[in-house]
Amino acid sequence: MKWWVQSKWLIVPFFLLLTPSYAQAQTTITAFLPEVESYFRLSSNVRVVFDAKGYMEDGDLNHAQIGPSLQFNFRPLERLKRISVFDLDDIKCMPVVFTIGYRYLPSTIQPNINRLQPIVMFHIPFPGRTLLSDRNRADLDWSRGPFRWTYRNRITAERRLTIRSYHPGPYAAAEFSYQSQYSKWSVTRFFAGSLFPLNRHIQLDSYYEHVNNTGPHPNRQVNAIGAIFSFYFPPYKG
């Protein structure tokens, strides 16, 4: 059980998410998050990503984000290749991935935002053919207002299932965010969903997301349903 002793800290965020505080007033809303991602591999070490995402409340599109990214990866790890053999996303067999992206965030309720988005992601093989992903992301935002930044750490655990010749991928994730405007860890997110391959190049990520934001007053909670359509061209050949 040595692996459990070394990795038990990964379980702590999930228990923290199950103990929300009711001491403060809060507002709760529901949302739908449609998203389309396109991945184009240029070489064995470089991939281009184009992303478009919307944020809808009560049928109205309040926010959106759109923009490209460049991903850089090292050589794949053999154990990760065995775990992710049925996954369309070839980046999951790479132990370390660096990403630099730009996002433009138009909005109908606040100033438009330009965002620089550096990311470092680690993929870790876990017992039981489970894949752990540790994503460290910074959102560097500038608009007509003051410059703001957010650090977001997301831990994801996923495992591919085999149902005859089909291989869905259920997962759970927790994310914690530090926001400069509040000078504290103010946002927690919990995700539960599954990846559904549709063909050799297209995958659907259907998920539920719960957000607790303690930065504004009153606290803001969001319950959202998300759907991400991902397109992969071509697959990694390594």
Image: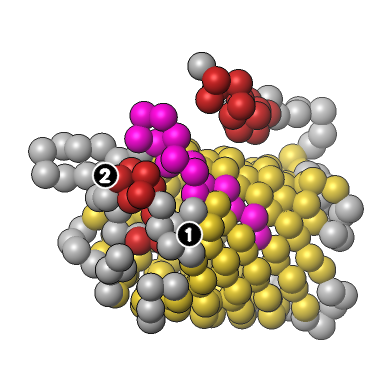
Boundaries of the magenta span = 123-137
Residue occupied by mark 2: 168
Does the magenta portion include 132?
yes
Amino acid of disc 2: Pro
Magenta stretch: dominant secondary structure:
strand
- Depth check: give the residue in front, 77 or 49: 77
* Displayed quadrant of residue 5: top right
Q: Residue at x 33, y 43 (%)?
A: 83
Label 2's element?
Answer: loop
Amino acid of disc 1: Leu
| 164 left or right, relative to 231 | left
Q: How is the image coloured?
A: secondary structure
**Is residue 43 placed above or below 179 in the rendered structure?**
below
Q: Which mark is residue 67?
A: none
Any part of residue 183 in sight: yes
The spot of residue 53 in percent (x, y) is 49, 69
| 53 left or right, relative to 42 | right
Q: Quarter of the image for the C terminus: give it.
A: bottom left
* Displayed quadrant of residue 146: bottom right
Residue occupied by mark 1: 33
The spot of residue 166 in percent (x, y) is 16, 45
Q: Residue at x 26, y 44 (%)?
A: 168
